Image: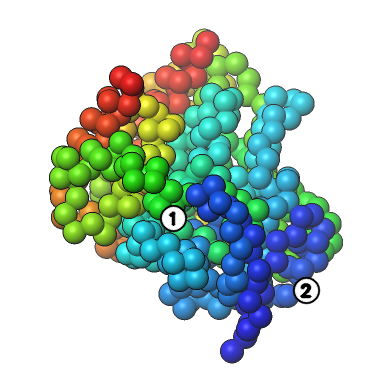
Amino acid sequence: MTELRYLAPETLDEAVGAFAKAGSAARILAGGTDLLVQMRSGILKPGVIVDIKKIPEMTAIEQTADGGFRIGAAVSGMALAEHGKFGKAWPGVLEAVNLIGSKQVQGRASAGGNLCNGSPAGDSVPAMVAAGAVVTIQGPDGRREMKVEDVPAGPGRTNLKPGEILVSFKLPPRPAGSSDAYLRMIPRTEMDIAVVGVGVSLTLKDGTVTSARVGLGAVAPTVLLVEDAAKALIGSKLDDAALAKAASACSAACRPIDDKRGTIAYRTKVAGVLLKRTAAIAAQRATQKN
Amino acid sequence: MAKVHVTTTINGEPMEFLCEPSDTMLDALRGTLNLTGSKEGCASGDCGACSITLDDRLICSCLMLAVESEGHDIRTIEGMAQGEKLHPLQQKFLEMAALQCGICTSGMLVASDALLKKNPDPTEEEVRFWLAGNLCRCTGYDKIVRAVMETAAEMRAQ
């Protein structure tokens, strides 16, 4: 029987050192809402747990000099919701993060954990992809940045190298006329896993879309950036033809599984439907702000 | 296995205890500390029967390691009444029969208290969404929701 060791370093260098040294036996603890359940069920028996919440950078929410935001990987959904300005700039990212679990879970669960858990259905991920978020990662070889959409490698897997730790998300500054939204399809109203999730971020000028990004979740082994859907929206006034084209692009991008939550045909169709609805909400928010 | 020494604050009182690194906060509360008001329902964060607050934030104690409480402020159902005087929510749950078997009740009370501290005037919808992480197999929720709404109204009037 291996003994579990709990470490709570106060600096990132210490955390990376301990995490890399312990190799595959180590697990990072942020909110613990996935890790503790996996340990309890016996799926996972880590030898070392590295709790990252004593590292200030991991739990900080900062507005950067350029007007963007930097969110520590271990910031809980509730902490993000309580921030005065974040939800005004990124309502879609916030609503996605706040769809993860109950209020109790939101008190602990983080966007960093949601991403590193590698679930294709993680709610915050399509919204972060749409937002154009870039993550900072630190490992034994130093720091590097990666686009959010490049982090997941498949169900339960990421492209982080051994010993690397997700440190923070960087969200870009918002030009005037920008907003975002996230919608997911679940069979009930609360506390369920997405059958399809769509994040849309838009910038509008005089009613015309000048930039757009679309993130699509739960319909492929990883969350997808759907560039064809964004292209269909850019330059349009979100008229029916443009929305139909973008919806088709989302459906075409789907490579879903059949399971108890939804069939392949259902997920593929709903991806298009949700794109239209999500884009409408993002556009309405973007216009309201002007 | 080497036990870990933890220094924390529980219901305003400084507290020290020993635990295994893998013990959950709920294990420590119910076992070592003999605070058995928090219940274990699912042990996976779905039912809310083990709800506590950590630095005034509502969480499930089954989803937190006991060692993580080092230096933090924990509040449990045992800290809700002031001596013999029940908290208004506890009193109202009794008066309006917002409980039957009682397993979910301490979690419901801790969660409702956390809501009213954050939002003294919630709508019914807000109460229902806030309590979505607290499962009750007896009441059908309606009496609980009404008791929370009624308590909120009385607390605002005072």
The amino acid on which the numbered mark 2 sits, given as a three-letter code, is: Lys
- Asked whether A61 or A224 is in front, the reply is A61
- Asked whether A262 or A52 is in front, the reply is A52
Q: Which chain carries label 2?
A: A
Rounded to the nearest whole Å, what is the CA distance between mark 2 and mark 1? Answer: 31 Å
User: Disc 1 designates what residue?
Assistant: B60
Task: Tell me whether circle 2 and circle 1 mark residues in contact (CB < 8 Å).
Answer: no
Q: Is residue A145 visible?
A: yes
A1 over B69 or under it: above or below? below
The amino acid on which the numbered mark 1 sits, given as a three-letter code, is: Cys
User: Disc 2 designates what residue?
Assistant: A21
Residue A32: where, in percent of width, then height?
54, 60
Residue A120: where, in percent of width, then height?
47, 56
What residue is shown at x 44% (from left), y 32% (from top)? B118
Say what secondary structure mark 1 lies in: strand
| Residue A150: mark in rendering | none
In-image side of B86 versus A163 (left or right): left
B84 over A117 or under it: above or below? above
What residue is shown at x 60% (from left), y 71% (from top)? B18
User: Mark 2 Cα within 10 Å, few/some/many (few <14, many 20+)?
Assistant: some
Say what secondary structure mark 2 lies in: helix
Q: How many marks?
A: 2
Q: Mark 1 lies on which chain?
A: B
